[in-house]
Image (spheres, rainbow, N blue to C red):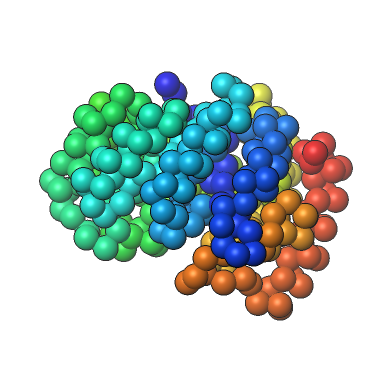
Amino acid sequence: MTIKGVYTALVTPFTQDGQVDWKAFDRLLDMQVKAGIDGIVISGTTGESPTLTVDEKVSLFRRARAYLPASVQVMAGTGGNCTKQSIELSKLAQDAGANSLLIVTPPYNKPTLAGLKAHYEAIGQSVKIPLCLYHVPGRTAQKLSPEDLATLCDIPQVTAVKEASADLFLFSKALIHSKANYLSGDDFTYLPSLALGGQGVISVVTNVFPKAFVELTKSFWSGDTKRALALHNTLLPLIEGLFLEANPSPAKDLLAHMGIIQNTLRLPLVSVLPSTHEKFLKTFGETRNQLVELGAFE
């Protein structure tokens, strides 16, 4: 399976009492399908994976795969800082129907390259579906070199990388030397990453405006770079706003404003400040209107 295109790092909706909101989850999935998204990531950073139980994660994987058409891929976030536990969850995700696995470089442990290689090899050998390596130094406190990433991409099961360092030089150099597809893990670098040879994105903003990145991708790959740039410029203020506070608090605030989910997070995450909310509403409205004009809003 080739991992490429526009994937949404889906939020996990909760009810007011903190349980998974399955009706809202279905609404989120419907919204993604309607927009023509290529895949979704369940239980990633945006999905509040650290606060989900194993049973909740597996239920989310299973529900997504059963609900979505075959054309939409399901990538399951199963990486962690314990290899044994990551293997166990990866097997459960595969059994639940996941098409691929998102495996973050182990946070907090900060293993050597030899340890990372052994970690990814052990997980890859335990399943029959491909792995997407998740490089996010801002959350794991470990920034790999392009050469390190290329070494890890020599592992046969690692067929893609979610590169979220926001370092386009690293992205470009790693891509040149690696045997894997590279996907932008930072929305604001998506368009330039395509120019460098990137093959897609795992996005936060597509929770709110999924069709916009689908259209940006189509425009770029068809040679209409002017429209792709117009979409990028239109989305940029909202993308910036989505990271004014810890992700996914801003995304959930907007989705609640749209009436799709309830604005509920699990501690230690909390809702955005009222001042941030007010900024969002103005930016959201302006962005939506511009996307309508560009034919990139459902």
Quadrant occupied by the N terminus:
top left
Please provide percent x and percent y for residue 63.
54, 36
Q: Looking at the picture, tell me which residue is in the foreground, 70 or 24.
A: 24
Q: What residue lies at 57% left-to-right and 21% top-to-bottom?
A: 70
Please provide percent x and percent y for residue 166.
45, 54
Please provide percent x and percent y for residue 278.
76, 72
Quadrant occupied by the C terminus:
top right
Q: What residue lies at 69% left-to-right and 59% top-to-bottom?
A: 262
On screen, residue 131 versus residue 213, left or right, reads: left
Q: What residue lies at 69% left-to-right and 54% top-to-bottom?
A: 261
On screen, residue 293 versus residue 185, left or right, reads: right
Q: What residue lies at 38% left-to-right and 61% top-to-bottom?
A: 139
Q: Quadrant of residue 153?
A: top left
Res 113 seen here: yes
Res 103 seen here: no
Please provide percent x and percent y for residue 231.
72, 44
On screen, residue 24 versus residue 100, left or right, reads: right
Q: Is residue 70 above or below residue 269?
A: above
Numbered label tally: 0
On screen, residue 216 versus residue 117, left or right, reads: right
Q: Looking at the picture, tell me which residue is in the foreground, 192 or 19.
A: 19
